[in-house]
Image: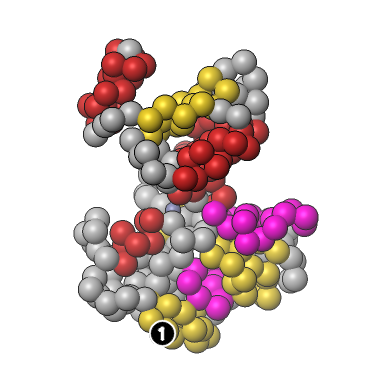
Amino acid sequence: MSPTSCYAAQSAKTPLAPFKVDRRELGSNDVKIAIEYGGVCHTDIHFARNEWGGTHYPVVPGHEIIGKITAVGKAVNNLKIGQRVGAGYMSGSCHECASCKAHLEQYCLKGFSTIFNSLSKDPGGFAFGGYSKNIVLDQNFVLIIPTGLNPASTAPLLCAGITTYSPLVHWGVKPGMTVGIIGLGGLGHMGVKLSHAMGAKTVMITTSKTKDQVHEIFKITGGIVYILPEIHSIQKVFGPEAARFSQRE
Ligand SMILES: [Zn+2]
Ligand SMILES: [Zn+2]
């Protein structure tokens, strides 16, 4: 076991505070990472406050992490000590089912595990996340971060970034298309930047008149901002196709 300093919430009502947890001994497929940067995703806050239920305390959130590898297990072949890597929300799957064999681990038939608040091989049987000095993770859920990327601003790509990049790729966003993004939050601002970088005309749909960042970000992208009086009026502006969004609110 290897003790590491971290920030943990002990209950839904207590703020994150310094704590110590034990990481597991390095397995043959594991890498140990000295964490340098961690993004703050709202999921971390939801879990710390038990807003979705099911939080196992103490909880150490953190699922957008960047760091350097300090040790590798015997079966690790494409990751090296000293290399800068990242890890996101998923941390394990069975590696044997049809989904895993098709590299669709998010659909693992046995269920995937997550970097925190999940059963794990760590001491105590529960995973602690990335608001921590060190972490031990399965090499299959660790990504190589290209040199030249700013590691601090790369960390949020590991959850907010991929969450918005995935649908843009799914719908084949390219120049000549128009993309509407509802809400300029942690994910929304990523979506705006990615959509713009893919060459699409990007439309921000928001109910906030006071968000200076809305206008700041659109100075960069040259996109359009629609400010709606309330989200239900989206259908009046964008037609019946947008109805399903207003219904979900
Ligand atoms: Zn599986
Ligand atoms: Zn997240």
Q: Quadrant of residue 201?
A: top right
Taking 173 as reference, is 87 above or below it?
Answer: below
Identify the residue shown where x is 33% and y is 13%.
239
Q: Give the colour scheme of this rendering.
A: secondary structure
Q: Secondary structure at mark 1?
A: strand
Of 116 and 61, the residue lying toward us: 61
Residue type at the position of mark 1: Phe
Range of residues picked out in magenta: 130-156
Q: Residues within 10 Å of mark 1 (few under 14, many from 20)?
A: some
Q: Quadrant of residue 246?
A: top left
Of 185 and 165, the residue lying toward us: 185
Magenta stretch contains residue 197: no
Residue 17 placement (x, y as % from top left):
38, 81
Taking 150 as reference, is 240 above or below it?
Answer: above
Taking 159 as reference, is 239 above or below it?
Answer: above
The reply to whether residue 1 is in sight is no
The reply to whether residue 78 is in sight is yes
* Extreme residue toward the right, this view: 148
Residue 53 placement (x, y as % from top left):
22, 59
Magenta stretch contains residue 154: yes
Pick the quarter of the image with the C terminus. top left
Identify the residue shown where x is 37% and y is 56%.
43
Of 63 and 75, the residue lying toward us: 63
Taking 229 as reference, is 14 above or below it?
Answer: below
Residue 62 placement (x, y as % from top left):
46, 65
Residue 88 placement (x, y as % from top left):
52, 56
Identify the residue shown where x is 57% and y is 17%.
177
How many badges with numbers are in the image?
1
Residue named by callout 1: 19
